[in-house]
Image (spheres, rainbow, N blue to C red):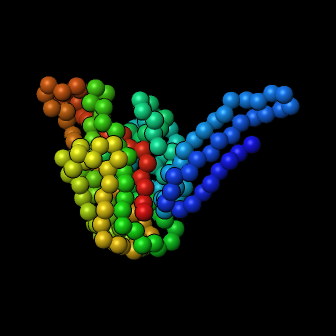
């Protein structure tokens, strides 16, 4: 049996279980965040590290928020390249906000991005920046970083998240390249 409700730009859930006469299985429950990007095609300029790439680019738009404590199955990990993801919304839409779910776990050498920039395009050739957040703004926003902007028409949404580079002395992983871990990208 499955219960599901689906609407644009909302949270929805699904519960399912297996049953036979006189036997009922455990209930599986999953919450989904539904928005313009959910289930759409994503192109990555550089692939995530193979250790943190389960589900590939689709992980960014599958509607499933990564669990905490984190594990590599819910997140895409980028170390040297950062993340450059382009989402094809399939049609031109009016959008005003992009949210990016990022992880901060310095003990595991994972730091918030140094910057996140959102660019939009109607033709996937000419992109226009609609905003950029610096590391301080990203840290203040916590896990879900939100960039709001004036209404723009877009079919393609590009999200570029840069790494902080080398980890500073005295911090976990000092001298090594910092990781960024990204999960959901939401477009509204």
Question: In front here: 99 or 10?
Answer: 10
On the image, the x and y values in percent for residue 125 come to 37, 71
Residue 48 appearing in the image: no
| x and y percentages locating residue 26 in the rendered image | 68, 29
Q: Is residue 119 visible?
A: yes
Q: Say which residue appears at 42% left-offset and 60% top-offset.
A: 187
Residue, x 24% and y 34% (percent of image)? 177
Where's the C terminus, which quadrant?
bottom left
Going 36% across and 73% down the picture, which residue do you hit?
152
The extreme left residue here reads 169
- Residue sticking out furthest to the right: 21
Q: Nearer the viewer, residue 67 or 128?
A: 67
Residue 112 percent location from the top left of the image? 27, 41
> Is the residue 179 above or below the residue 138 in the image?
above
- Residue 25, quarter of picture: top right
102 left or right of 62 in image: left
Point out the image quarter for the N terminus: top right
Residue 58 point in image, percent of width and height? 51, 49
Count of numbered circles in the view: 0
Left or right relative to 44: residue 172: left
Q: Residue at x 36, y 62 (%)?
A: 97
Residue 41's place in the image compared with 32, above or below, is below
């Amino acid at each position: 049996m499955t219960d599901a409700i689906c609407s644009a730009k909302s949270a929805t859930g699904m519960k399912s279980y297996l049953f036979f006469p006189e036997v009922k299985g455990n209930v599986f429950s999953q919450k989904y965040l539904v928005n313009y990007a959910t289930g759409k095609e994503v192109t990555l300029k550089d692939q995530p590290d193979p250790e943190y790439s389960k589900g590939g680019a689709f992980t960014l738009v599958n509607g499933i928020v990564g669990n905490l404590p984190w594990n590599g199955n819910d997140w895409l990990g980028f170390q040297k390249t950062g993340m450059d993801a382009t989402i094809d919304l399939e049609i031109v839409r009016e959008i005003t906000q992009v949210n990016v779910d990022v992880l901060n776990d310095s003990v595991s050498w994972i730091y918030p991005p140094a910057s996140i920039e959102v660019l939009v395009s109607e033709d996937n050739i000419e992109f226009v920046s609609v905003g950029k957040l610096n590391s301080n703004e990203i840290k203040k926003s916590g896990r879900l970083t939100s960039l709001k902007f004036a209404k723009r028409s877009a079919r393609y949404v590009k999200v570029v998240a840069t790494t902080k580079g080398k980890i500073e002395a005295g911090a976990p992983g000092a001298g090594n390249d910092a990781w960024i871990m990204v999960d959901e990208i939401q477009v509204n």
